[in-house]
Image: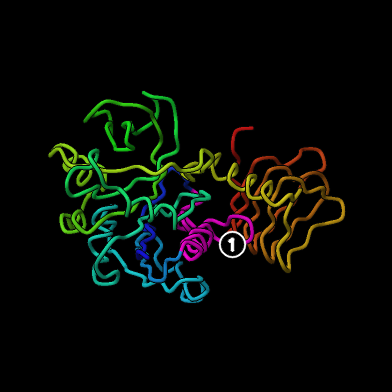
């Protein structure tokens, strides 16, 4: 089974002020941080060795957090973000040789990692040339001409970032999870982007990349609205009206619906809490006259509202 890397060094600027307190991959999602959900999926898919890069608010990636992951993870510090390609290049010593599953640390998706790796191993044949596909991108299907990726008749990438490399049979959205093979790993720059600096030059040379059909429902947690939507989906998948973590307290006069209240948090007052996320250890007073809707309450007391 391939090793894996979780990309967690980004700045998360679109999610400020939440990311002034936590790196985006550590945002609380349901009963644990987002990155813990990713580590669980990698382990379930057979990954037994992983790396994680950190930069922004690097001290927040505590040893206890990493030690609780179901797969051993080596943490690599970047004094400034090296980019998706540079981060993987910097992790060469931690990951060893062979294929690597690369997973953006702000992506939540129910993806079969073992099936993705198997598809990469089978990406051979006429569509992929003599050497086969150098990487396999997980792509959520869409009609031809739509989305960020164009897919050929054999599953090959024929459109990427508006550039065309063949006849398109279907469209799709790249979901930020991919398998990178050894041939491309040898070409990684010390700084740079996987798509712009690695995949596009590879395709321009007439070489092949493959795709893997990913689930159509996924979350790129890059905005406040997307974060709240991902939290709502976490509840819905478990058939929960709400979730209140260990040691948290909710005043008897507060109706909590569609919301996650983290461990040790306190919800006081009277009224309604709807579609919200209260981070672990946070405190919020709910006003009886005005329901608190689609908002995040941070541990440091910030109240950040999304458009209702």
Q: Residue at the far front: name it.
A: 125
Image coordinates of residue 195 in percent, x first then y, are 26, 43
Quick one: quadrant of the N terminus?
A: bottom left
Mark 1 is surrounded, within 10 Å at the Cα level, by few (under 14), some (14 to 19) or many (20 or more) other residues, namely: some
Image coordinates of residue 193 in percent, x first then y, are 25, 47
Using residue 120 as the reference point, say whether residue 39 is left or right of it: right
Secondary structure beneath dot 1 equals: strand
The residue positioned 69% from the left and 46% from the top of the image is 236
Image coordinates of residue 255 in percent, x first then y, are 82, 47
Q: Residue at the far left: name it.
A: 205
Image coordinates of residue 271 in percent, x first then y, are 82, 44
Q: Quadrant of residue 163?
A: top left
The residue positioned 41% from the left and 71% from the top of the image is 48
The residue positioned 60% from the left and 33% from the top of the image is 307
Residue 191 magenta? no
Q: In which quarter of the image is residue 102?
A: bottom left
Q: Nearer the viewer, residue 162 or 215?
A: 215
Using residue 198 as the reference point, say whether residue 7 is left or right of it: right
Quick one: quadrant of the C terminus?
A: top right
Magenta highlight range: 17-45
The residue positioned 32% from the left and 36% from the top of the image is 154
Q: Which of 87 and 16 is in front in this view?
A: 87
Q: Residue at the far top: name it.
A: 145
Q: Which of 63 and 216 is in front in this view?
A: 216
Q: Nearer the viewer, residue 173 or 12?
A: 173
Colour logic: rainbow
Number of numbered callouts drawn: 1
On screen, residue 160 above or below 135? above
Q: Residue at the far right: name it.
A: 252
Q: Mark 1 points at which residue?
A: 32
């Amino acid at each position: 089974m391939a090793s894996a890397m979780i990309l967690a060094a980004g700045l998360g600027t679109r999610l400020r002020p939440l990311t002034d307190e936590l790196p985006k991959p550590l945002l609380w999602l349901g009963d644990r941080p987002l990155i813990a959900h990713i580590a669980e999926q990698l382990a379930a898919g057979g990954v037994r060795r992983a790396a994680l890069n950190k930069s922004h608010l690097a001290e927040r990636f505590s040893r206890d957090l990493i030690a609780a992951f179901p797969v051993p993870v080596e943490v690599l510090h970047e004094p400034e973000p090296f980019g998706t390609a540079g981060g993987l290049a910097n992790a060469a010593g931690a990951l060893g040789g062979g294929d690597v599953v690369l997973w953006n640390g702000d992506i939540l998706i129910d993806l079969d990692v073992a099936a993705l790796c198997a598809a990469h191993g089978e990406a051979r044949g006429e569509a992929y040339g003599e050497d086969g596909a150098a990487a396999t991108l997980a792509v959520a299907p869409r009609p031809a001409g739509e989305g960020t990726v164009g897919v050929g008749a054999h599953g090959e990438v024929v459109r990427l970032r508006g550039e065309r490399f063949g006849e398109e049979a279907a469209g799709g959205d790249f979901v930020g999870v991919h398998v990178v093979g050894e041939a491309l790993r040898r070409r990684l720059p010390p700084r740079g982007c996987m798509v712009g600096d690695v995949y596009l030059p590879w395709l321009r040379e007439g070489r092949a990349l493959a795709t893997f059909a990913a689930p159509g429902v996924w979350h790129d947690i890059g905005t406040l609205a997307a974060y709240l939507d991902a939290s709502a989906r976490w509840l819905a998948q478990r058939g929960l009206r709400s979730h209140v973590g260990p040691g948290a307290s909710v005043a008897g006069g507060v109706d909590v619906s569609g919301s996650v209240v983290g461990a040790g948090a306190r919800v006081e007052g009277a009224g309604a809490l709807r579609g919200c996320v209260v981070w672990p250890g946070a405190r919020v007073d709910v006003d009886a006259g005005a329901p608190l809707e689609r908002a995040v309450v941070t541990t440091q007391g910030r109240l950040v509202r999304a458009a209702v």
